Image (cartoon, rainbow, N blue to C red):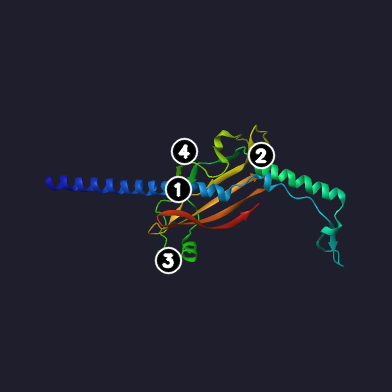
Amino acid sequence: MKKLLNLALLIVIILFSSCKKKITDLEFEKNVMSEIFPSLIDSICIDIRLFTNFPPQYGESIFDETGHYIGVDSTKATKEQKRKLLEWKINTEKIKRDTSKIIIAFNPLLKDNSQDLKEDFKKHFKNAKIFIAKEKKETEYLFDFKNIKLNNKFELRNISQFPKERGAIWVTKYNFVFSGAVIFSRIQFDKDKKFGILDGGFVCGRLCGQGSRIYIKKINNKWVIDKIENTWVS
């Protein structure tokens, strides 16, 4: 009987320790995400007003003998082109000086990256120990972003606050500056949790957006972005 009680106690201790470790790993990931989050937003999000504010043509287009476009001769700019360029510069500066908050829709549900990033760790982080994938796939958690202070003029709002109908988020007229939607995956760490990789994406319309693979590392006890690589463009 005593042996059975000891065995039961041992099982309880093992289960508790296992559960505690999983909670600790998740809290570690949440803490890293909270620390790096302002830098992620600054690196991934854009002001759609500047992104789509293309400069007007200035000068005469030049073509070669076969009719292929070569460039523009700016010395042949017309008065109308000069006027439009001046207007563009004034409008660009006006947008840059605007202190209005740029609203970004954010999905706080962070999911595991479906890709095996072992080779990415080996290629980018030479000193990292071999990446060990999570045993449980397709795990997710809700990231509490509301109390995180951002560095820039971006303001995040839960994507659930925006129209849910297909494509409606892009055509709805808002009483604020809406720039797009941002998403992130969960962070995958190396064995020693000194390096991490996650994916991010910013969508600014039906055919407007880009995805990124983000490499982070710990330097002087602080998590920083080491490199960002584009993975897709629309």
Q: Secondary structure at mark 1?
A: helix
73 horizontally vs 165: left or right: right
Residue 58: x and y in percent read 81, 54
Question: Is residue 230 shown above or below 65?
Answer: above
Disc 2 or 4, which lies upstream in sequence?
Answer: 4
Residue nearer the viewer, 127 or 118: 127
Disc 4 or 3, which lies upstream in sequence?
Answer: 3
Name the residue carrying label 2.
170
Neighbours of disc 1 within 10 Å: few (<14), some (14-19), many (20+): some
Disc 3 or 2, which lies upstream in sequence?
Answer: 3
Neighbours of disc 3 within 10 Å: few (<14), some (14-19), many (20+): few
Give how far apart the Cα atoms at labels 1 and 4 are. 12 Å
Residue 150: x and y in percent read 52, 43
Give how far apart the Cα atoms at labels 2 and 4 are. 27 Å
Name the residue carrying label 1.
35
Residue 186: x and y in percent read 47, 49
Q: Amino acid at mark 2?
A: Trp
Residue nearer the viewer, 85 or 33: 85
Residue 57: x and y in percent read 80, 52
Furthest residue toward top: 175
